[in-house]
Amino acid sequence: MDFPIIQESEEEQQINFFFEDIDFTPPDENLLTAWLLRAAEEEECSVSEITYIFCSDEHLRKINIDFLNHDYYTDVITFPYDDNSIQGDVFISCDRVRENAEAAGVSFERELSRVMVHGLLHLAGYDDKLPEDKIRMTEREDFHLDYCTFC
């Protein structure tokens, strides 16, 4: 007996959105997914799967302490799972994104998009530890933000 193959849309399998300890609704998930997949394509990388987990400052700080031995708040932490494709988890503090957006004078959606593509770029192999790497990362973020129609 042949069983039918049930296929989800390719985008649904590649990029997922979850929420830990907050009540949060991201901008249109379909637009986000399409934009992020386009960014990966521009970086000449294939996306296996990215899981974005939105959480609070305290939740992300605990992850920072438990897994990276860093006792401070941050807006994003990325955990890559594959060196050959974009695959991993991207934890984002919505509290920190909101504060950073206010400090930078930009919308929450724009700052959230910056942080999301920042995580994708880390999964694509970019680093931002050295000043020159940070400059390159920011240039790529800005490039991708220019194509963001919803932020």
Image (spheres, rainbow, N blue to C red):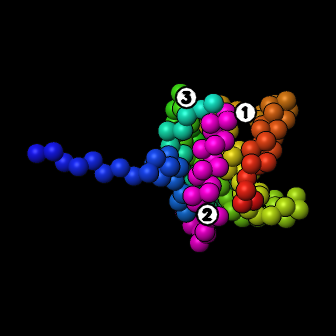
- Residues at marks 1 and 3, CA–CA distance in whole angstroms: 14 Å
Q: Secondary structure at mark 1?
A: loop
State the residue at coordinates (65%, 49%). Answer: 35
- Asked whether residue 23 is drawn in magenta, I would say yes
Instruction: Identify the residue under disc 1.
Output: 127
In this rendering, the answer to whether 118 lies above or below 130 is below
Instruction: Identify the residue under disc 2.
Output: 28
Residue type beneath disc 1 = Asp
Instruction: Identify the residue under disc 3.
Output: 83
Residue type beneath disc 2 = Asp
The numbered mark, 3 or 2, whose residue comes first in the sequence reads 2
Residue type beneath disc 3 = Asp
State the residue at coordinates (63%, 30%). Answer: 44
Mark 1: few, some, or many residues within 10 Å (few <14, many ≥20)? some
Q: Quadrant of residue 138?
A: top right
How many numbered badges does the structure rendering display? 3
Q: Nearer the viewer, mark 3 or mark 2?
A: 2
Q: Nearer the viewer, residue 56 or 17?
A: 17
The numbered mark, 1 or 3, whose residue comes first in the sequence reads 3
